[in-house]
Image (cartoon, rainbow, N blue to C red):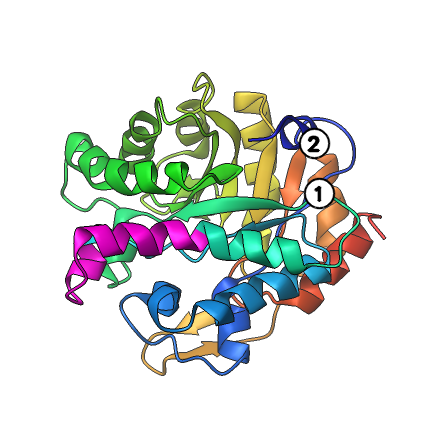
Amino acid sequence: MSDSLATALTEGPPLVLDGGLSNQLTAAGHDLSDELWSARLLAEAPEAITEAHLAYYEAGADVVITASYQATFEGFARRGIGGPEAARLMASSVDLAREAARRARADRPLWVAASAGPYGAMLADGSEYRGRYGLTRAELERFHRPRLEVLAGAGPDILALETVPDTDEAEALLRAVRGLGVPAWLSYSVEGDRTRAGQPLEEAFALAADADEIVAVGVNCCAPEDVPRAVETAARVTGKPVVVYPNSGESWNAAARAWDGAPTLTRADFPGWSAAGARLLGGCCRVGPETVTAITRALGRT
């Protein structure tokens, strides 16, 4: 990570993160109803990924997250894609985000976070929101380490260890990022004051307090109302900058395969979260470029 980004996480105005990559790709007409999700487009439509990143940079995002959330050696293997090509596709996710930054009309630094989703994302069965996969921490570490090595080797500014549902996987990830030479943030998916698997957030964040590789902690892919307590807990327990990027507040109806309800995330939420310790703020599912622009304005960045 560049010195300027390291400094920006602790000094100066808060940074703005992008919104949901899948949101922008779907809006552009791409079908993501696939086990590889947006990672499928790394092979089939890489230019679409660059355009989606560009939309967020131009909306005001300082940092975008790559299309590697669901990109794994195991997932690509199920499609007949061998290890070397899978590694190339994962690394290309960083290159595509860098290309978007080169095209962006921006007068500020632009950074790339390489996404590493949880083990459950590879399963593509919703278990990423439950955790407790029945694997040991050592098995989870062996799953994560090879792709983290590939992503780190592609030269992102930071690794995004995101949507982590439980402390077992968090501990595995903390071991898996050691020695990679690239810093990371650790972001849990939560419900109320607990991880999705039910562990208290104080215990979950405490795992990262003394991990030198982790430069920020926080929450993502959660309801907006779950953010304030998480920000306070993360900042108090770790003393590190906090990253937050919740969903829009709508709920997913699995039976109907559609989103229900109205968004509850508003631009008015972000100044309070920033005052409580959040240094990197954006959105996850159902959050698009227009909301990122609203976040930027709410934080006084324009």
Disc 2 target residue: 8
Residue 35 as seen in the image, left or right of residue 80: right
**Residue 29 percent across, percent down from the top left:** 49, 83
Image marks 1 and 2: residues in contact by CB distance under 8 Å: yes
Residue depicted at 69% across the width and 59% down the height: 104
Residue 269 as seen in the image, left or right of residue 191: right
Residue 33 as seen in the image, left or right of residue 233: left
Q: What residue type is labelled 2?
A: Ala
Q: Quadrant of the N terminus?
A: top right
Q: Distance between the residues labelled 1 and 2?
A: 10 Å
Residue depicted at 75% across the width and 36% down the height: 275
Locate residue 239: give its quadrant: top right
Q: Can residue 205 be seen in this view?
A: yes
Disc 1 target residue: 109
Quick check: is 31 in the magenta stretch? no
Residue depicted at 38% across the width and 37% down the height: 153
Residue 31 as seen in the image, left or right of residue 52: left
| Above or below, comparing residue 35 to residue 271 in the picture | below
Within 10 Å of disc 2 (Cα), the crowding (few <14, some 14-19, many 20+) is some
Label 2 sits on a secondary structure element that is helix
Tell me the magenta residue range. 74-93
